[in-house]
Image: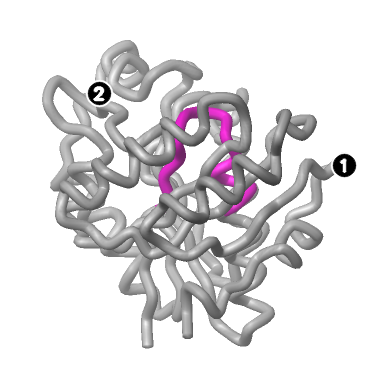
Amino acid sequence: MKKVCFVTGTDTEVGKTAASCALLIAAREAGLSTAAIKPVAAGCDDDGHNEDALALMECMTADLGYEQVNPVALPEAIAPHLAAEHAGRRLRTGQLAGLCRGVMASGADFVLIEGAGGWRVPIGPRDTLADLARELQAPVVLVVGMRLGCINHALLTAEAVLRDGLELAGWVANQPGEAMACHAENLDTLQRLLPAPLLGEIPHLAPWSAQQASQYIDIHRLIP
């Protein structure tokens, strides 16, 4: 049975790609074939490649070309709608949905679609990445960056996802830096208030290792 999930975050730089890579490896180790797409990425190297998309490619089992994994690679590391405008491009939900469906049809058992920034990040004058998730009717995995303010951000994002008519399939607690004050108490509060299962708690790892991070993921809470 194919499982498709849209990965969003409580904010930018909370570890969406870190959690996505951990989920992909955990699914692979559970015996599933995997694929991922980051339809829009803002911030590329001199070769026009985004480091998050490259990380996804390293962790999935599908043999997809870069242009399939990151079809819209925008040079500037700024808000996607501004990066697109500066690059002379106009992004539309329907166009991005078609690109995602191409990867969804690749035959992989488990497909992740990674967003950019948070839930309501604009991609154009009216469209947001939330519109893309709605177009695809994809269950959502929320990555919570465990830092001051995360409870408010997580609850507001969960509320928005549910209001948009989508399933909140689970959430990942990711520690992007040194542990926040009262970490355990904040985690307990989130577990009590978020209407979805905790898929894993990824600690701050230095050096970073997707393989090690995957050990903290319980993929069977997402894929029975």
Residue at the (66%, 55%) spot, across then down: 201
Q: Quadrant of residue 170?
A: bottom left
CA distance separating discs 2 and 1: 37 Å
Is the residue marked by circle 2 packed among few (<14), some (14-19), or many (20+) residues within 10 Å? some
Query: In screen coordinates, is 189 left or right of 88?
Result: right
Is the residue marked by circle 1 packed among few (<14), some (14-19), or many (20+) residues within 10 Å? few
Question: What label sits on residue 89 in the rendered view?
Answer: 2
Q: Return the x and y of residue 40 as percentages of the image width and height.
A: 38, 37
Q: Amino acid at mark 1?
A: Pro
Residue at the (28%, 21%) spot, across then down: 81
Q: Exactly how many numbered labels are in the figure?
A: 2
**Residue 136 inside the magenta-drawn segment:** no
Q: Quadrant of residue 138?
A: bottom left
Helix, strand or loop under label 2:
loop
Helix, strand or loop under label 1:
loop
Tell me: residue 169, above or below residue 68. below
Q: Amino acid at mark 2?
A: Arg
Q: Which residues lie in the magenta part?
A: 7-19
Q: Which mark is in front, 2 or 1?
A: 1
Residue at the (87%, 42%) spot, across then down: 207
**Residue 11 inside the magenta-drawn segment:** yes
Question: What label sits on residue 207 in the rendered view?
Answer: 1
Q: Return the x and y of residue 141 as percentages of the image width and height.
A: 42, 56
